[in-house]
Amino acid sequence: QVQLVESGGGLVQAGGSLRVSCAASGRSFSTYAMCWFRQAPGKEREFVSAIRWNAGNTYYADSVKGRFTISRDNAKNTVYLQMNSLRPEDTAVYYCALTSRMMVLMSNGRDYEYWGQGTQVTVSS
């Protein structure tokens, strides 16, 4: 019903910036929130940030607060994650997810309904 496509990943040096995007498409879907997760090799999936689609409330993991900014363009059904002051430990595949239901957003992601394929972000030291 909903397809999510991430883009914008790449290779950057520590201290650099990158913006990843996620566009949602489909038929007859509603959005309560969209969020970003990341997963590094050998590690569990980690919540990064979320934004409530209509209200605009934002949520951040402590590890990225002050460095990352989530935003959305309702008309384009697109969510963005601006990543500044990147660190090698930010290296991961970044996934976006969407939920149409009210739920706890800062979670392990198991209850999110739709997922993108991920985009690789690599930060070199």
Image: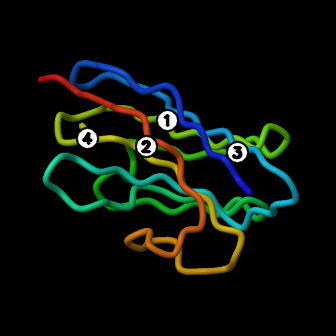
Q: Nearer the viewer, mark 3 or mark 4?
A: 3
Q: Are marks 1 and 2 in contact (CB under 8 Å)?
A: yes
Q: Is residue 64 above or below residue 112?
A: above
Q: Residue at x 29, y 51 (%)?
A: 39
User: Amino acid under label 3?
Assistant: Ala
- Which residue sits at x=37%, y=71%? 108
- Position of the C terminus by quadrant: top left
* Residue that carries the numbered disc 4 in the rendered image: 90
Quickly name the residue at label 2.
Answer: 68
Could you say where residue 59 lies in the image, as x and y percent from the top left?
A: 51, 63
Corner quadrant of residue 47: bottom left
Please give the residue where the numbered disc 3 appears in the rendered image.
Answer: 24
Whole-angstrom CA distance, mark 1 to mark 3, is 18 Å
Q: Closer to the camera: disc 1 or disc 4?
A: 4
> Horizontally, is 70 left or right of 83 in the view?
right
The residue where tag 1 is placed is 82
Q: From the image, state whether disc 1 or disc 3 is nearer to you.
A: 3
Going from N to C along the chain, the mark reached first, 3 or 4, is 3
* Amino acid on which disc 1 is placed: Gln
Q: How far apart are the alpha carbons under marks 1 and 4? A: 13 Å
